[in-house]
Image (cartoon, rainbow, N blue to C red):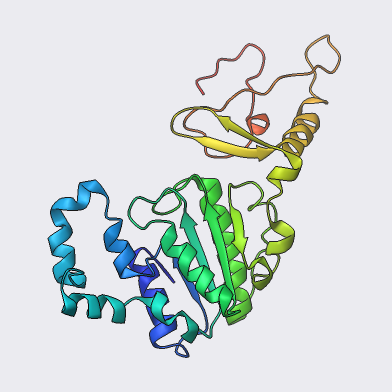
């Protein structure tokens, strides 16, 4: 299990030593060294020659042979162990195509692979709800492969922006937990440039109703209240409605 180069190492382990590991988890790992070098971002141009020396120069015959020999995509048919892949669609370092193409190659050979794509992530999963969701998927994937306990995925995937692009059936509970944002309608709440939260309409309505229907004001009946955005420091919830509100007469610094 690993990310970036660690993701490549995972793919290399499953292709070059296919029976040495029980399974693999690849996070934003390159599968084809040729296409990886072709998508080097502009701010890495100064170091491109260094990459050529370390990995192989695609402009020479010897370099081409080395890159071909060391690209897991060229040996995808050798994979015999389950694989979980996590990828950010906006990754500037390891293009999303690196994950797409090995999933396509494995699917064509009917080799088990689960592919989770986050459309609002880059080189890794920075947003807490997405990180939690992928960890939950990983925990259940590893529990199936290695044995042992695992907490259910629950609503973690639905509360994230995860898209299960392939192989939900290979990870316990993932089919049931897969997001249905297109069917139920999704609401993205942006409280600041730093935090973005995504919830379903059903979750928002249920949470608001449960929290606010029973709240009382002095001398008044149960009142309706609108949700408010959390402060930039809030990391405790993905829903505005679950933020604690200040009591009457008190000052809030949130």
Describe residue 165's horizontal placement relative to residue 24 as left or right: right
Rendering quarter of residue 245: top right
Rendering quarter of residue 175: bottom right
Residue 232: % across, % down: 47, 30
Question: Residue 201, relative to residue 122: is it above or below?
Answer: above
- Tell which residue pokes out farthest to the top in this image: 219
Q: How many marks?
A: 0
- Tell which residue pokes out farthest to the right in this image: 221
- Tell which residue pokes out farthest to the bottom in this image: 19
Q: Which residue is found at the position 63% from the left and 30% from the top?
A: 240
Residue 17: % across, % down: 40, 88
Describe residue 79's horizontal placement relative to residue 112 as left or right: left
Q: Quadrant of the N terminus?
A: bottom left
Q: Which residue is found at the position 52% from the left and 39% from the top?
A: 235
Residue toward you, 13 or 61: 61
Rendering quarter of residue 215: top right
Q: Which residue is found at the position 67% from the left and 13% from the top?
A: 248
Residue toward you, 50 or 39: 39
Question: Residue 210, relative to residue 61: is it above or below?
Answer: above
Describe residue 202's horizontal placement relative to residue 195 as left or right: right
Residue 72: % across, % down: 38, 77
Residue toward you, 72 or 253: 72
Describe residue 12's horizontal placement relative to residue 78 as left or right: left
Q: Which residue is found at the position 24% from the left and 80% from the top?
A: 65
Residue 83: % across, % down: 53, 74
């Amino acid at each position: 299990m690993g990310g970036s180069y660690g993701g490549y190492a995972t793919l290399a382990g499953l292709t070059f030593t296919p029976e040495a590991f029980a399974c693999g988890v690849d996070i934003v790992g390159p599968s084809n060294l040729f296409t990886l070098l072709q998508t080097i971002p502009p701010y890495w141009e100064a170091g491109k020659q260094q990459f050529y020396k370390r990995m192989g120069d695609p402009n020479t015959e010897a370099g081409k042979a080395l890159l071909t020999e060391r690209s897991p995509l060229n040996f995808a048919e050798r994979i015999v162990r389950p694989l979980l892949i996590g990828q950010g669609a906006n990754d500037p370092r390891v293009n999303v195509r690196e994950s797409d193409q090995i999933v396509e190659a494995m699917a064509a050979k009917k080799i088990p692979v689960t592919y989770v794509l986050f459309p609002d992530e880059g080189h890794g999963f920075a947003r807490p709800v997405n990180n939690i969701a992928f960890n939950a998927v990983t925990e259940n994937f590893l529990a199936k492969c290695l044995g042992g306990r695992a907490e259910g995925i629950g609503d973690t995937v639905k509360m994230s922006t995860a898209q299960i692009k392939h192989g939900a059936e290979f990870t316990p509970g993932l089919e049931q937990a897969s997001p249905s944002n297109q069917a139920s309608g999704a609401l993205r709440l942006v409280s600041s440039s730093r935090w973005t939260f995504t919830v379903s309409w059903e979750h928002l309505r249920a949470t608001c109703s449960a929290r606010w229907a029973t709240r009382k004001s002095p001398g008044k009946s149960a009142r309706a209240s609108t949700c408010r955005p959390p402060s930039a420091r809030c990391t405790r919830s993905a829903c505005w409605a679950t933020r604690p509100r200040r009591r009457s007469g008190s000052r809030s610094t949130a």
